[in-house]
Amino acid sequence: MTPLPPSAASAEHLTDVLHRNGALGSGRVSAVSVDRTFPTILSLVQRLRLTYEGASPDAPTSLIFKTDLPNRPGANWESGRKEVAFYTTVAPATPDGLLLRCFEAHHDAASGAWHLLLEDLTDSHLVATQWPVPPTIAQSEAIVRTHARFQAAWWDDPRLGVTIGTWPEPKAVRDWLKDLAASYAKFADMLGDRLSAQRRAFYERLFDQAPRVLQRYRTRRNLTLVQGDSHTWNCFLPRDGSSDTARLFDWDAWRPASGAEDLAYMMAMHWYPDLRQRAEGHLLDCFHAKLTKLGVTGYDRSSLQDDYRLAVLWLTTRPIWMQSAGIPPVIWWNHLERIHLAADDLDCRALVS
């Protein structure tokens, strides 16, 4: 039997939420049932079916309720708070047509409890494939153009680091590098001879050269907001194949950064060489063309390529963080191998030589 939804998704609460959003008219939600449950690595997603009395014809027949996953892996990573912040600060200032409509975003600082009530696009949109199968090239084009649409809206926005997100202070960067190096030492010790001498030497050079390599981000030019967890399964594509109606979702890792980071995480981190080598350049071309069409200037294709290589370089550290956070090996081990293959293809080691 499907468990009843929590109080934050009760009929009474949803009636109040939908009234506040002008989505219900004078009616009320009379009953709520859980249609489907989708546990992810870090969160629990439920599709709620709503029954009404006297509601407007436009009232949503279902909603997505997202909250923390009990006893999840990666429990030492605070989940939810950043995504709630995204939907309360970034989403209202983002042009329509890029995100799911959020009816409520709540985080309790004292308890850490959080939840989101989101638009349900199940009937009109879909996730391209079942993880871990990558999408087609055409689907990938739609996804990177959607990222370009979102990023162009925030490109070099004066609110970045002021009222939207934060720029890390020098001390915070030093502390982050220190923690990363400590996590790497444990990571390397755990892997033993499964981590080659070549890769160990690479990580040593990266940590040594990190202050110089990070100078690109200190310019605070040609930067935007990134999704952070930008794999292709975090984008809804329209079932009818129409253009420019895809929607990005899952924003728990958003931050101001180089836009190429989302593309590198999508392709270099998740795709094996055969597909990546065939599609990578073309999709970067599509992304850059869309940025340019949307009015981004002073950022040529070679600059995107430079940022992409730099993003791949830093993504070689992501599996270290994942392992230290308790993410399952089926994820971080495959990421480790794929990202190093991409770093080899793009000669990212030259960036720290």
Image (cartoon, rainbow, N blue to C red):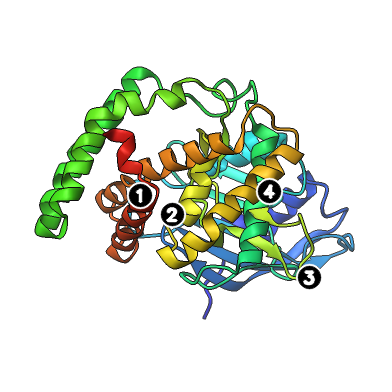
Q: What residue is pinned by disc 3?
A: 240
State the separation of the CA atoms marked 1 and 3.
37 Å
Q: Which residue is mark 4?
A: 102
Does 214 sit left or right of 295 as displayed?
Answer: left
Q: Secondary structure at mark 1?
A: helix
Mark 4 secondary-structure assignment:
strand
Instruction: Tell me the distance, in whole angstroms, between the alpha carbons under discs 2 and 3.
Output: 29 Å
Query: Amino acid under label 4?
Result: Cys
| Residue 111 visible (yes or no) | no
Q: Position of residue 155 (x, y in %)?
A: 64, 31
Neighbours of disc 4 within 10 Å: few (<14), some (14-19), many (20+)? some
Where residue 93 appears, as percent x and y from the top left, is 71, 34
Whole-number angstrom distance, CA of label 4 to CA of label 3: 23 Å
Sequence-wise, the earlier of marks 4 and 2 is 4
Secondary structure at badge 2 equals loop
Counting residues from the N terminus, which is met first, the one under dot 4 or under dot 3?
4
- Of residues 1 and 332, the one nearer the viewer is 332
Label 1–label 2 contact, CB within 8 A: yes
Q: Which residue in the protein does label 2 denote?
A: 268
Mark 1 → mark 4, Cα distance in angstroms: 37 Å
Report which residue position mark 1 lands on. 343
Q: Nearer the viewer, residue 94 or 43?
A: 94
Q: Estimate the x, y position of residue 254 in percent, counting from the top left.
A: 52, 40
Select label 1 or label 3 by which is in front: 1
Q: Residues within 10 Å of mark 1 (few under 14, many from 20)?
A: many
Could you tell me which residue is drawn at 25 percent across and 49 percent down?
A: 324
Residue shown at 89% from the left, 63% from the top: 57
